[in-house]
Image: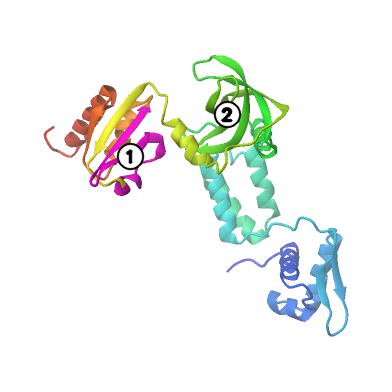
Amino acid sequence: MEPEASPTARALLTLELIQGSPGITADRLAGKLGVSERAVRRYVGILREAGIPIESVRGPYGGYHVGRGLRLPPLMFSATEALGLVMAVLDGHHDASDPAGLVGGALGKIVRALPEPVAAQAEAVRRATAAAPDRGAARPDPETTTVLVRACSDRRRVRLGYRSEAGSEWDADVDPWAVVVRHGRWYLLCWSHTSGARRAYRIDRVRTVEVLPDGFDPPAELDPVAVLEEHLAVGWEYAVEVIVDAPFDTVARCVPRTLGRLEPVDAGTCRLVGTTGNPWWYAEQLAALPAPFRILGGPEVRHTTGVLGRRLLTAAGEEP
């Protein structure tokens, strides 16, 4: 049996009904909430004490409505929505269960604002979950990310202090086009005036950000995710060329842009051209293709694909 909602939770439901049906009467509210009209008036009183301007008009055409001055209504979650939110946060942030952490503290505020029956279920999931962190994830500093997101929105150039994976450090003046999250990593897609080229910088490696007075216009009809994935597929150490024995439309549905550029050769064949810094990862991606393929270029990827293939045959009990 589900526990009875608290007066505060009932008051929030009352607010939601009034917002959804301005002019709703006390008897209709009582019917929807399953309580008496006296209880409805008590819930309205709770809302008014909280500073929410609930106004009422007497008479046959009167009822309750929200007056001016209410800018941000309280968030309303069903049990399913709340649990989904908690699970998504826990899945993405291994420190979400720590109330002293930034994410954990924010999640705690959301849980405390929920009606008691919903909060109890959400908190139970939060306590019982031991999230396994994504080893490949790299979460940036929230303040740095906020500054960059605002600069993208305001179309203001920024000066970045950056540290590469190898430890090199430099400054770059860039036009920040978009902040994109892919596979647990946050990227700033931008045009670098220092390099005179398009760049994608890992935000967790940004040391400093200075917003400059110069403005800019991003490329027309920019698709940040597509551009980022195309960018991540080029410029790596090992070049690859693969022929896939299947129609272009069939293969295109299974090949992420991070593998490279896919182009049709004829009606039943297509070519994949790209680069990679990790031949083992690239070989694993090729193994998932839904059609036979041949590696024409890239001895490193050809080698790792052969080793992977022999391992799979051995695991299946077949002779390599």
Left or right placement of residue 203 versus residue 17 in this view: left
- Give the quarter of the image for residue 151: top right
Q: Residue 226, how many percent across, how many down?
A: 47, 40
Nearest to the observer: residue 235 or residue 109: 235
Pointer 2: residues within 10 angstroms few (<14), some, or many (20+)? many
**Of marks 1 and 2, which one's residue comes earlier in the chain?**
2
Q: Which mark is residue 191?
A: 2
Which structural element holds mark 1? strand
Q: Residue 104, how many percent across, how many down?
A: 63, 41
- The quadrant the C terminus occupies is top left
Amino acid type, callout 1: Glu
Which structural element holds mark 2? strand
Amino acid type, callout 2: Trp
Which residue position holds label 1? 263
The figure's colour scheme reads rainbow
Q: Residue 123, how many percent across, how many down?
A: 60, 51
Which residues, given as a range, are shown in magenta? 249-275
